[in-house]
Amino acid sequence: MFVLDSSSAIAWILPDERGPDPGWLLRLSSEETAIVPVHWILEVTNALRMAVKRRRLAPGDPAQVLERISHQPIEVDPATIGLGWREIPAIADEYDLTTYDAAYLELAMRLELPLATLDHDLARAARTAKVALFA
């Protein structure tokens, strides 16, 4: 199991997104389960909307992408909701992250799981917090 942030998922979804071999997610997902905070799907669906708006995807593509994602072994962590009031903002302050990104770090720290991210600030914070990164 590993924590999957939206930057890694988006790199897998958008073929022109820059990052190290986004195909790793597809291969990895067939072997392991990802866990995400509750806001993950909103970040992913917003990225899809913006990709259509910027003509990186055709208008019908997001539905197909979401269908593919729905077949991946991805669990949503419900505890993120309650931790969003105090614990996650405190982590955001400590590691100079957005609260959205701090939710990924908190989840990885709490469950002692590696974090899959292409976000430089989140990766920096994970290294500082001694959280393993997927590369």
Image (spheres, helix red, strand yellow):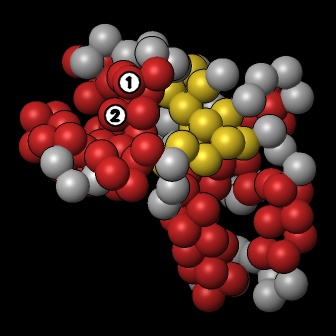
Question: Which one is nearer the viewer's eye here, 96 or 55?
Answer: 96
Q: Is residue 35 left or right of residue 97?
A: right
Give the answer, above or below, for where 123 lies relative to 133: below
Q: How many marks?
A: 2
43 displayed left or right of 71: left
Disc 1 crowd rating (10 Å Cα; few below 14, some 14-19, many 20+) is few
Q: Secondary structure at mark 1?
A: helix
The residue tagged 2 is 106
Quadrant where the C terminus lies? Answer: top right
Q: Position of residue 88 (x, y in %)?
A: 24, 44
Q: Position of residue 63 (x, y in %)?
A: 84, 76
Query: Vertical placement of 116 versus 56: above or below?
Result: above
Image quadrant of residue 27?
top right
Amino acid type of the residue tagged 1 in the rendering = Arg
Q: Residue at x 88, y 64 (%)?
A: 67
Q: Position of residue 47 (x, y in %)?
A: 58, 69
Q: Pointer 1 and pointer 2: residues touching (CB < 8 Å)?
A: yes
Circle 2 packing at 10 Å, graded few (<14), some (14-19), many (20+), is many
**Residue type for callout 2:** Glu
Question: Residue at 45% of width from left, 15% of height from top?
Answer: 112
Tell me the quarter of the image containing the N terminus.
top right
Residue positioned 80% across, 39% down in the render: 73
Tag shown at residue 110: 1
Which numbered circle lies on residue 61? none
